[in-house]
Image (spheres, rainbow, N blue to C red):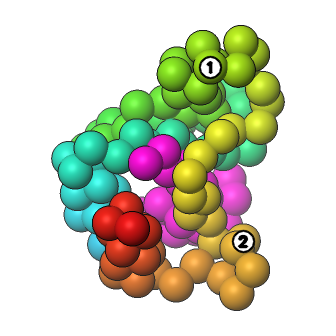
Amino acid sequence: MILAIDFDGTICRGTYPAIDGLQPNALTYINALYEEGHYIIINTCRTGDQLLEAINWMLQQGIKFHRVNDNSPCNVAEHRDNSRKIFADIYVDDRNLGGFPGWVAAYDEITQKAEE
């Protein structure tokens, strides 16, 4: 499955633009999803130096991902366009309706949907 994961408030703690550490369990579950074969796209509004800071921070933390703010090559080829809207099977974001349930619940829901 393709997962679009928001950065601020979902992977990192802090009030934008601060990066005040990892959300609880973010590293464990994002990397588990990556290792299970899910395609991880980091989806963020950050640009320029703030985007570079976020990418470098994720690399320093050891967070595994495939792309940042960019569609998977298979979707670009299929649709012959790289739309600004990131295509994903699941979007993980602290601004979801009902809020972000935390990484334990998010992981459980993602793995359940992957098994369907």
Q: Give the range drawn in magenta.
A: 1-23
Q: Residues within 10 Å of mark 2 (few under 14, many from 20)?
A: few
Horizontally, residue 90 falls left or right of residue 64, namely right
Amino acid residing under circle 1: Glu
Q: Residue at x 47, y 60 (%)?
A: 11
In space, the residues marked 2 and 1 are separated at their CA atoms by 29 Å
Q: Which residue is drawn at 56% across and 52% down?
A: 89
Q: Residue 78 carries which label?
A: 1
Q: Residue 93 carries which label?
A: none
What secondary structure is marked by label 2? Answer: loop
Residue 17 or residue 45, whichever sits in front = 45
Please report whichever mark, 2 or 1, sits nearer to the chain's N-terminal start.
1
| Residue 13 on image: x %, y % | 52, 68
Residue 37 magenta-highlighted: no
| Residue 40 on image: x %, y % | 43, 43
Q: Residue at x 68, y 38 (%)?
A: 86
Q: Residues within 10 Å of mark 1 (few under 14, many from 20)?
A: few
Q: Which of marks 2 and 1 is in front?
A: 1
| Residue 93 on image: x %, y % | 62, 65
When the figure is inspected, residue 73 is found, relative to residue 100, above or below; the finding is: above
When the figure is inspected, residue 60 is found, relative to residue 48, above or below; the finding is: below
Q: Is the magenta stretch mostly helix, strand or loop?
A: loop
